[in-house]
Image (cartoon, rainbow, N blue to C red):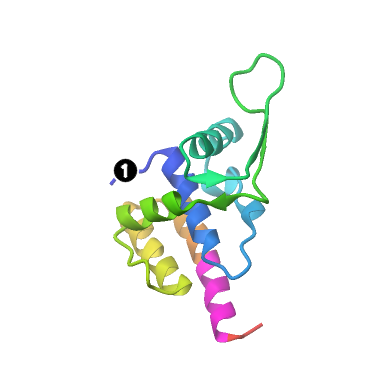
Amino acid sequence: MDLDNKQKVLLALYTEYQKDLPMMRDIKADTLGLSRDVFNVAIEKLQNEGFIRDAAIAYAGRSPYPYDVRIENCKMTRYGIEYVESKLQIEPTLSGAEKTKGVAKKVAEWGWDQGKDFVAKVLAEVLKSSTGVQ
């Protein structure tokens, strides 16, 4: 499966969502290997299509692209969660750690290097949290 940029951002949001205390602001364009404009438009599209909510989108001048997006209060919708789990064939009843492992496996299969790095970081945090290790 080839991922488009919007799907990459959605997977990052889904993965971060699996933490007990998600920090959506940790998801950044450069972390995902995207330009700021592409990242901002992906966030705009995901919100318009109902996959996420509560992203703050700002425009400046006559540019058709968002000037800035703020996703620290962003949340995935039920529709967004179901979409990702359906596409990745992730069982909804799994734990956050198991879901993150499923994302890691798929991202590795697709060869998306930035995604592997991001998911590995989140997986380590999820596992640390679930075992109570600080």
Name the outermost residue toward the bottom: 132
Quarter of the picture holding the C terminus: bottom right
Q: Amino acid at mark 1?
A: Asp
| Residue corresponding to mark 1 | 2
Examine the rendered structure and indicate whether residue 58 appears above or below residue 85.
above
- For the view shown, which residue lies furthest in the right direction? 60
- Residue located 31% across and 57% down the image: 109
Corner quadrant of residue 99: bottom left
Residue 9, percent from left and from top: 49, 46
Could you tell me residue 119's position as x and y percent? 48, 61
Q: Nearer the viewer, residue 130 or 113?
A: 130
Name the foreground residue: 28 vs 42. Answer: 42
Name above or below for residue 103 compared with residue 129. Answer: above
| Magenta-colored span | 122-131
Q: Magenta residues: mostly which secondary structure?
A: helix
On the image, the x and y values in percent for residue 114 come to 48, 52
**Residue located at (53% from left, 39% from top):** 47
Q: Is residue 52 above or below residue 24?
A: above
Tell me the quarter of the picture where residue 81 sits. Answer: bottom left
